[in-house]
Amino acid sequence: MSPRLVLATHNAHKVGELRAILAPGLPGLTESDVVGAGDVGAPEPVEDGVTFAENALIKARALAAFTGLPAVADDSGLAVDVLGGAPGIFSARWSGRHGDDAANLALLLAQLADVRPEHRGARFVCAAALVTPDGVEHVEHGSLIGVLATAPRGEHGFGYDPVLVPTNETRTCAELTPEEKNAISHRGQAFRALAPAIARVLSAG
């Protein structure tokens, strides 16, 4: 079966997570309906936007043009209060190497080593974008507020999940089950908000 929707990510974790998030809002959607950019051999565009929304749109536009299918992309990251919102759009390459989660975590924790618990506020931020080959564009946002732990904890998730403890939680995002995380995550919020627009596009097609 040919895919009906392409997610602009080469990260297998994100593909699985986003399928799970979208499924309840899109009855009848099968795993083969939704694939990642890596599954279709799409190149990764240069993300030179200065906001999460701009970068999400850059990725979705490039993928829609490459595949001729509706494309969904997100750009997300960690915004730390005492760092003025950094790492922000540079979250995935904070240590200088894109996607080196361990190095990014180590650098961030070193930078915050002397910051007291009451000043370790942070939030995950996500912008999710839908772009169709005929130019329809839609963007939604989500955020997950919490505080930063002093050391990584947990085996689930990826990125900065092991250090963000959501508000009203004692566990980090990496200690939550995937279902618990999806229910409250910044990405879950943004993609659930985007799901009705995706459903309209797919039903029209």
Image: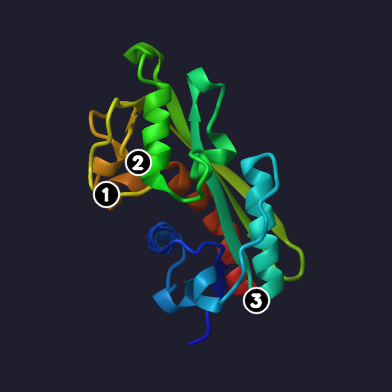
- Which of disc 2 and disc 1 is earlier in sequence? 1
Secondary structure under the numbered disc 2 in the rendered image: loop
Q: Which residue is mark 2?
A: 161
Secondary structure under the numbered disc 1 in the rendered image: loop
Kindly tell me whether residue 104 is visible in this rendering: yes
Q: What amino acid does circle 1 point to?
A: His
C-alpha span from label 1 to label 2:
8 Å
- Which of disc 3 and disc 1 is earlier in sequence? 3
Q: Residue 179: image x %, image y %? A: 29, 51
Image quadrant holding the C terminus, namely bottom right
How packed is label 1: few (under 14 Cα within 10 Å), some, or many (20 or more)?
some
Q: Would residue 46 appear left or right of 97 to someone viewing this image?
A: right
In the image, what residue occupies the spot 68% across and 74% down?
A: 66
Q: Which residue is mark 1?
A: 156
How was the colour assigned to the protein in this rendering?
rainbow
Q: Which residue is mark 3?
A: 67
How packed is label 2: few (under 14 Cα within 10 Å), some, or many (20 or more)?
many
| Foreground of the two, 101 or 187 | 101
Q: Is residue 179 above or below residue 19?
A: above
Q: Is residue 11 above or below residue 189?
A: below
Q: Would residue 99 appear left or right of 138 to someone viewing this image?
A: left
Q: Dots 1 and 2: beta carbons under 8 Å?
A: yes
In the image, what residue occupies the spot 33% across and 15% down?
A: 117
